[in-house]
Image (tube, coloured by chain):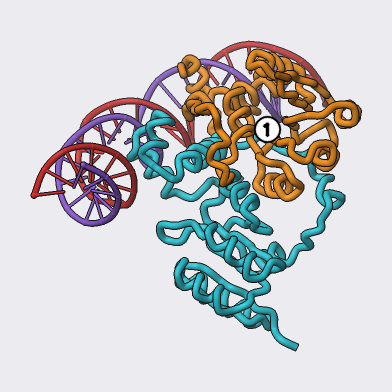
Chain colours: A cyan, B orange, C purple, D red
Amino acid sequence: MDKEHILLVEDDEVFSRVMTRALLHRDYEVSHAANEDEALLLIKSTLFNYAILDLNLGGHTSLGLIAPLKQNNPSSRILILTGYASITTAVEAIKLGADNYLAKPADADEILGALLLDKNQTNAAAHPEATHHEPMSVRRLEWEHIQKVLNEHDGNISETARQLKMHRRTLQRKLQKRPVAK
Amino acid sequence: MDKEHILLVEDDEVFSRVMTRALLHRDYEVSHAANEDEALLLIKSTLFNYAILDLNLGGHTSLGLIAPLKQNNPSSRILILTGYASITTAVEAIKLGADNYLAKPADADEILGALLLDKNQTNAAAHPEATHHEPMSVRRLEWEHIQKVLNEHDGNISETARQLKMHRRTLQRKLQKRPVAK
DNA sequence: CTGCGGTAGAGACAATATGCCGCAGCCCCT
DNA sequence: AGGGGCTGCGGCATATTGTCTCTACCGCAG
């Protein structure tokens, strides 16, 4: 029978090579695109069962690829991957139809797991851990807040800085850093 | 015309009082439930336009309320609020049908904003009023969060600093300064 | 009484972060 | 061509943190 076909959209050279190999090794067929245009061409010409999209592609987000993918194959499953994870972007991705959202760094097993996870996970499974939560660290809170405001202003850094009453240069520097682990 | 009816499910005394008042003040009709059972009763007896659910209700999550709400009124909009935000719970909530997900601390404007507007809506005319609210500054947000956590630990600075993953000396210094003006 | 473990307040110094400058490159619009 | 917005980034003075250290206070077990 045919192998399952995965679309990998990722602009990081190293990561995409490693990931591609890992997927091939698991007996998937893999197509790779480094940017939105390449991805769209592939989507038009091929039927994918799965897609792994890096959220940050140069200037754009990869969110625009979700619709074409779903249109091409409504039953395909889509995973958004990002090194700059935030609740806001996660919510947006899911609303747009992504099936899961994962923060880098993540290894191939995690990624595949998140991609394959049963979508019919009615909330029966995932609750017991609802109790042991800790408050967010101030840094994490700050990161989430920044992401939210940034998202509200369509990624406009200058405007966001103004709203947040912080210097644009400062915001810029904060955004270059990675989100803080929990 | 009838006021819009909001269901507030929140087990925190103080917060729910404040929130209720803020909502009434904005001319909404508000029903409040402190736990899942109360909420279910209300859902069965009333049609809600909106719902604000605290994710953490004692032991349970409030995610189980999403289905009944949507069943009761498919066009109702649901906001999940939580003090212990995480990407995974956010993803799960949205998958289950919540319309937005917000981390506390957040003020009434932010909460209402998150509840009412949906930037992914193609319906551009959906916002009759300019929902232009100013986001909290990072400083203010930090202050509120610190106060909340400090309060949860009965004013214990050492413990609060540990939870917030900041140095005790730093917290100590922050507390000596005064509340940040907005 | 004394020691142990926890907390609080504060000084000192180095490591970072931030505010503020300026500059160059891009776009978009007129 | 110019004006005005946004972005990325270097440099530098200043402000804020992280760390370490000391002192002191409190409650409690030994």
Q: Is residue C26 left or right of residue A17?
A: left
Using the rendered view, name the quadrant where residue B71 is placed.
Answer: top right
Quarter holding the N terminus of chain A?
A: bottom right
Q: Give the residue at x 68% y 36%.
A: B84
- Closer-to-camera residue (B59/C14): B59
Quarter holding the C terminus of chain A?
A: top right
Dot 1 lies on which element?
A: loop
Q: Name above or below for residue A28 compared with residue B25.
A: below
- Answer yes or no: is residue B156 visible: yes
What's under tag 1, amino acid-wise?
Gly
Q: Seen from this angle, which residue lies furthest bottom?
A: A1
Q: Give the residue at x 72% y 30%.
A: B50
Q: Give the residue at x 59% y 48%.
A: A92
Badge 1: chain ID: B
- Answer yes or no: is residue B170 visible: no
Residue A46 lies, in percent from the top left, at 59, 79
Residue A100 lies, in percent from the top left, at 67, 57
Q: Is residue A124 left or right of residue C18?
A: right
Q: Give the residue at x 71% y 23%.
A: B4
- Closer-to-camera residue (B125/A54): B125
Crowd around label 1: few <14 · some 14–19 · many ≥20 (10 Å):
some
Q: Give the total number of marks visible in the rendering.
A: 1
Q: Where is mark 1, residue-wise?
A: B83
Q: Name above or below for residue B156 compared with residue A145.
A: above
Residue B27 lies, in percent from the top left, at 66, 16
Q: Seen from this angle, which residue lies furthest front?
A: B1
Q: Is residue B93 left or right of residue B131?
A: right
